[in-house]
Amino acid sequence: MLNIEDLHVEVDGKEILHGLDLRVPSGEVHAVMGPNGSGKSTLAYTLAGREGYAVTRGRVLFQGHDLTAMKPEERAQEGVFLAFQYPVEIPGVSNANFLKSAVNAVRRHRGQPELDAIEFLKLARQRLKLLNMDDALLSRAINVGFSGGEKKRNEIFQMWMLDPRLAILDETDSGLDIDALKIVAEGVNALRDPGRTTLLITHYQRLLDYVVPDKVHVLAAGRIIKSGGKELALELEAKGYADLVKAAAA
Amino acid sequence: MSVDIASIDPYIRQFAAARSLLPGAGFAWLDAKRDAAIKRFGSNGFPTAKVEAWKFTNLNPLARTAFHNVAVPSQPALTKAVLAPYRLTPDCHLVVFVNGQFRPDLSALDHVPDGTRVVGLRDADEDDLHALIAPPSVAVDTPARSLFDLNTAFMNDGAVVHLGRGAVLDPVQLLFVAIPDSPPPAFQPRNLICAEAGSSATVLETYVSLGVGAYWTNVVTQIAIAPNAILRHYKLQAEGGSAFHVAATSVRLEHQAAYRMFAVSLGAELGRNEFDIDLAATDATARLAGVTLACDAQHLDTTIRIDHSKPRGTSSQEFRSVVAGHAHAVFQGRIRVAPDAQKTDARQSSRNLLLSAAAAADTKPELEILADDVKCSHGATVGDLDRDALFYLQARGVDEADARAILIDAFLNELIEGIDGQAARAYFRRACDSWLAKGSRP
């Protein structure tokens, strides 16, 4: 399970998260919703260990370890996966070579035997087929020339290949048409299992029609100001964030 | 201009001793050319930073050492097996030079096809010698050409590659092996590549050292490409760590001629790789690309001048460097489009990756466009690895050191992928990989 306690995070000397508390038990899918500028992406990057996101107070416990003391690659090897809001384009590196390095780094850490090229390709092709994606993706450079939808689906594909214990999806629904959204949602749903914790970070309720969360949290001005069941998302969709934010500030 | 007498005096004296033993001695016109060249070198001396073309490359370390020139250097014993690792392929045509001297015993020229001629400079005919002496047609001020003059004075061997009409030569490798001794020697090879109409060739120049210690390679290569001929020209500069390497290559292209060049520079303490390209007739194409890999205290300079003299020429320059330690990479690229050269398409790009705080790169584009209906572009970047890309890889579980290696490799691969010919691609990838394995780790 993921346990975030009193998390304070500064970016460029400015505090963005002001004491965030969040508990997500194993096997559950939680949504974190909030208006623009509330700190949603800061939370995602802090969990993944991005440079420049300084934890000044509090801690993030995952499976008993404090994530904040680990390098990004150590977190990934421990099972943390961040699906990026803006996946990075990397010319000159093929998806296959990159993902094979990543999968084997994680497998080494877990004490599993590394996959050779043939085993890797077999697994990758099988996963791509399930996601209704073209094999050609493997030989293409990472995200280069991909449409917005392809980039997001590539994130879901990588997530399947890496088999994370904690999956964080940062606005994975943004910029997707309805067909791409359904594929992404199916990808997330297929990975629901008792050993995995999933955090969906989103501005809109739309994705939650397809991935039904166990809980919904509202993040505003750097804190969780309200938590509830899946109906909270519908309420936010109908009324907007303004009243909630005002009530929390009062 | 005041010239440092101490730095030039040894060369003047050595020239007097070698003059009558140099190839072509006795041809009055050639003797006169050599005499004039050493005289110009004597009055101009080594180029200083005041000479615009040399402003980023300080030759003081080179000028301070009195390198030793002789007409006929002594020859160490060597076997073909020792040279095998440096060959492009086990069966390519091969011309070996040891300490600047052609070594038929180590070369492989038995199967050179009809219509082509590959010989050492000492076996060149008088026409070849005339072609070797032809001044480059790209305009450069004389003080900048001082080392070219020194080569003209001392040139004592080199490769003459001649392709008759429609001939095909794929590929020939010119392998220059240095085995330095004391006093530190200078080698002054002069190569000629002459491609007649409709011919096609691939020529690889490789520079390596089998010993340790200082030496200086000062090489000049003259290339003429006739109408509809194509030359793929590759160069690997992997000189010894205490070496100096100065190379001047000039290329003249006729109607619809094509020149494709790829260079990897990773050797020598100080290296300069200079190209003067004249698109002297209509519809000519010159594509130059290359990679500089510099670490420790290396200084590696690539200087390109391209003259578009006639209409509808196409040229591109795509150069990248990876600089570690406190090394210094230089790229200077000049494009000149003559008033007559309408419909020119000229592009230039210089990208430099600095792997440490003390690493440096200077890049200077220079465009002189005198025609109005042309497409010209240039771009330059100097910086560290992309932080976003690095984080993306790490966030997937790849260690920082591996992530850096993947990104550096990708930066180079984008250019290496563009090399024509599988053997050359593999050859340069091997050279880059072995550098990356030892050179780039912080």
Image (spheres, coloured by chain):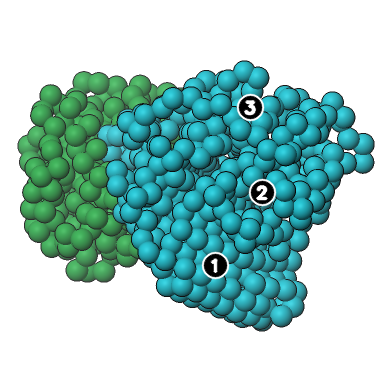
Chain colours: A green, B cyan
Residue B330 image position (x, y, % from top left): 64, 43
Residue A14 image position (x, y, % from top left): 54, 36
Residue B152 or residue B244, whichever sits in front: B152
Residue under label 2, please give it. B24
Pick whichever of labels 2 and 3 is earlier in the sequence: 2
Q: Is residue B20 left or right of residue A88?
A: right
Q: Which residue does the image show at 79% across and 37% down from the upper left?
A: B46
Residue under label 1, please give it. B225
Residue under label 3, please give it. B185
Q: Quadrant of the N terminus of chain B?
A: top right
Element type at mark 3: loop
Tell me which corner region of the image, top left, top right, bottom left or bottom right, holds residue B226: bottom right
Q: CA distance from mark 1 to mark 2?
A: 24 Å
Co-location on one chain, circles 1 and 2: yes
Residue B355 image position (x, y, % from top left): 52, 33
Q: CA distance from mark 1 to mark 3?
A: 33 Å
Residue A2 or residue B68, whichever sits in front: B68
Q: CA distance from mark 2 to mark 3?
A: 22 Å
Pick whichever of labels 1 and 2 is earlier in the sequence: 2
